[in-house]
Amino acid sequence: MRTEGGAGPAQPSNGRAASRRRQPMSGSGGPGGRWKMAAARSGAEGEEAAAAAAAGNGDGDPSVPATPGRAQVFAAVVDTFLEKLVTAGSYQRFANCYRCFYKLQPEMTRSIYDQFVSQLQTSIKEEIQEVKEEGNLEVLFNSLDKIVEEAKDHKEPAWRPSGIPEEDVRSAMVPYLLKHRSYLQKVLKEKEEENRKVAESVLAGRDRIAELQQLIQARKLAWQAITKEQRELIMTFREPQ
């Protein structure tokens, strides 16, 4: 509305517009406040989950801060990014870019800005959620947390690349090749032992065959001798012609 004297916008309307501009940025209903509350809520949930896990393990000491999981850290990073994005693209900068339209319709400018920020945040969250689902990040984060937790009990230093590919490959392949060589030597020794036993069995079979041949020959000669004696005996008892 304009005043009767033809001046600019009425003061009450400007007061309401200024009030509406200030309220979302300072209160919890604005984008920045909503994401701050979300980050605080996710941090609180992470601390409660870690405290519950520590209590379940029997070592819940309130003086020791609980380490958040990678999924919680990722969620906090996303919330911080959205908060920084809203801060960088503040309403003041948006209004300066569209100064002429802001002077004519400040309330409409504010409404467009709120819708733009809300849709931008929703789109970013949806994209990040799709990436998490496609990459199965929740399971991977939990696996990494489990690996790190299990590695705390290891006293030996973890392997790190030296920067020289030849040495790194050698350090990784030599133990495997030595283990494989030991396995092949073991298999070779077993095969040699089997071959030795088979050779002994073959030689023993040959000796047995030679003994059987000699026995057969001896029995053959004995049979021939007996047959000869029988013939002679028969000839003796045969009547003379």
Image (tube, helix red, strand yellow):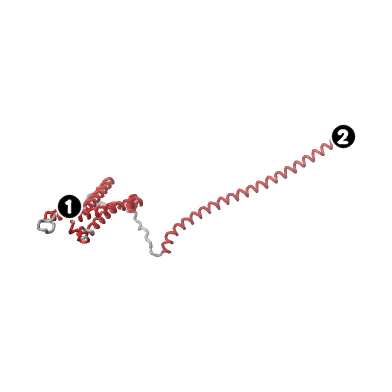
Name the residue nearer the viewer: 161 or 201: 161
Q: Residues within 10 Å of mark 1 (few under 14, many from 20)?
A: few
**Rendered residue at 43%/61% (across/down):** 169
Q: Residue 232 got which mark? A: none
Discs 1/2, front: 1
Badge 1 or badge 2: first in the primary sequence: 1
Q: Position of residue 168 (x, y in %)?
A: 41, 62
Q: CA distance from mark 1 to mark 2?
A: 150 Å
Q: Is residue 170 above or below residue 39?
A: below
| Kind of residue sitting beneath label 2 | Glu
Q: Residue at x 41, y 63 (%)?
A: 165
Q: Is residue 112 at least partly visible in the picture?
A: yes
Is 215 left or right of 115, judged from the image as shown?
right
Looking at the picture, how far across and down is residue 122, in whole percent? 27, 52
Asked which secondary structure carries label 1, the reply is loop
| Residue 108 image-quadrant placement | bottom left
Choose top left, top right, bottom left or bottom right for residue 238. top right
Report the residue marked by disc 2.
Answer: 239
Query: What's the residue at 78%, 40% (across, down)?
Result: 227
Residue occupied by mark 1? 27
How many labels were placed on the picture? Answer: 2
Residue at far right of view: 241
Amino acid beneath label 1: Gly
User: Toward the viewer: 77 or 140?
Assistant: 77
Q: Residue furthest bottom?
A: 164
Return the residue nearer the eye: 206 or 72. 72
Tell me the quarter of the image containing the N terminus.
Answer: bottom left
Viewer can see residue 153: no
- x%, y% of residue 3? 11, 56
State the residue in front, 34 or 59: 34
